[in-house]
Amino acid sequence: MSSIPFIGSLFTSSAIAAAPKTAGRDYFKELNVRPFINAAGTYTTLTASLMWPEVMEAMNYASKTFVPLNDLHDAVGKRIAELIGVESAMVTSGAAAALTVGTAACVAGKKHEWITRIPDLAGTGMKSEVIIQKSHRYGYDHAVRNCGVKMIEVETAEELEKAVNEKTAMMLFFNDADPRGKIKVAEFVALGRKHNIPTFNDAAADTPPTENLSKYNKMGFDLVTFSGGKGIRGPQSAGLLLGRKDLIEAARMNCSPNSDSIGRGMKVNKEEMLGMMVAVEMFRKRDAAAEWKEWERRAKLVTDSVAANKAIKTEIYVPPIANHVPTVRLTWDKAALPIIADDIRKQLRDGKPSIEIAPGSSPAKAEKQEIGVGVWQMQPGEAEIVARRLREVFNGTKTA
């Protein structure tokens, strides 16, 4: 890796140097796409988080020269594993891609003829079942099912042990669902170890805190994935797969640039690899305490903005696992405040500047209405704007 800057300088051509500067173009305006203040959070549909400037510098650097992709994949994976303190790592095209290639690693391993057969597992001898708690089923397990496996639902430890057989390839755990499941995280790992079955923890949205990056591997999970474009503030189209060296090696073989593999379309380019590495560096050395204090300040600013309206109940809370940051909840009864949450959302979205709050709304027919306001993706000065707009929107409604 230390040689790359020198290589980059060798291949900086006059054509690249002479390329026109485009910083002055307003691309979104040209395309008639309206930007907004993010008072929601790191939702994919709202383009998640904003990358660190250092990440953009790294990606821009990588865009100016050629390097052997697999060599860079190796080097970046090694650096990220060292930074986090895990056995092995790779950059994927998002956490969902990590679920697919991680599952493929558990199903096909490094066996070429099996790698090329996924998702057609019939008659191959490949293991074809993934055990998951019923309460952990979610939309993203489609990324696991891409590999042709059958999801085996269980609810208790006893059911899990009965479900284990010669076809069991992996045990999947959705980290955010831990409070809902009967088999808690430590017991789940222990059961995997007892039966010698790889365990995979989807912790995509579970940074911050910083220590989570290594926490679940240290607990004993064989594979863990995190989204690159949420709290870590790397490329939104990138993610991390962390875990056992043999499984990461197998995941690499089941992924791009290997053409006949389930992950061929899940391509990660050199810019994203380098950007993801720098994002991990920045995430680890940020001032987490100061960051948290600022989020609390913003949250209080938002709740204070509507405090005079006695019909509105305000709450600042921190989700226990995913999106573990100060978050605002505003609730009211329609009898006291005759407006629905969707109307609040529309007024904020249609205003100037446009403001997006957390997706999902109370049904219009529900008596109790609720909206969520995320503060951690706001930029400097935006909390004040959001607070003012919320006050204006709610003040435009007469209370009963």
Image (cartoon, rainbow, N blue to C red):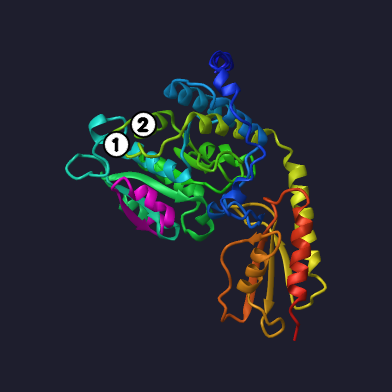
Crowding near the residue tagged with mark 1, few <14, some 14–19, many ≥20 C-alpha atoms within 10 Å: many
Frontmost residue, 275 versus 354? 354
Identify the mark nearer the N-term, 1 or 2.
Answer: 1
Quadrant in which residue 354 is drawn: bottom right
Q: Residue at x 45, y 34 (%)?
A: 268
Q: How many discs mark residues in the rendered view?
A: 2
Residue 339's image quarter?
Answer: bottom right
Residue type at mark 2: give it: Ala
Q: Secondary structure at mark 1?
A: helix
Q: Position of residue 379 (x, y in %)?
A: 72, 48
User: Does the magenta run of residues contain 154?
Assistant: yes
Q: Quadrant of the N terminus?
A: top right
In the image, taking residue 307 as reference, residue 355 lies left or right, namely left
Identify residue for label 1. Answer: 108
The quarter of the rendered structure image containing the C terminus is bottom right
Instruction: Indicate the position of residue 15 as horizontal and vertical percent values.
Output: 55, 21
Residue 278 covered by magenta stretch: no
Residue at the limit of the structure toward the right, as seen here: 308
Q: Nearer the viewer, residue 169 or 65?
A: 65
Residue type (three-letter) at the residue carrying disc 1: Ala
In the rendered image, the residue lying farthest to the left is 123
Q: Is residue 307 above or below residue 88?
A: below
Among the 4 quarters of the image, the one containing residue 367: bottom right
Q: Do the residues under discs 1 and 2 have CB atoms within 8 angstroms?
A: yes
Query: Which span is picked out in magenta?
Result: 139-158
The residue that disc 2 covers is: 250
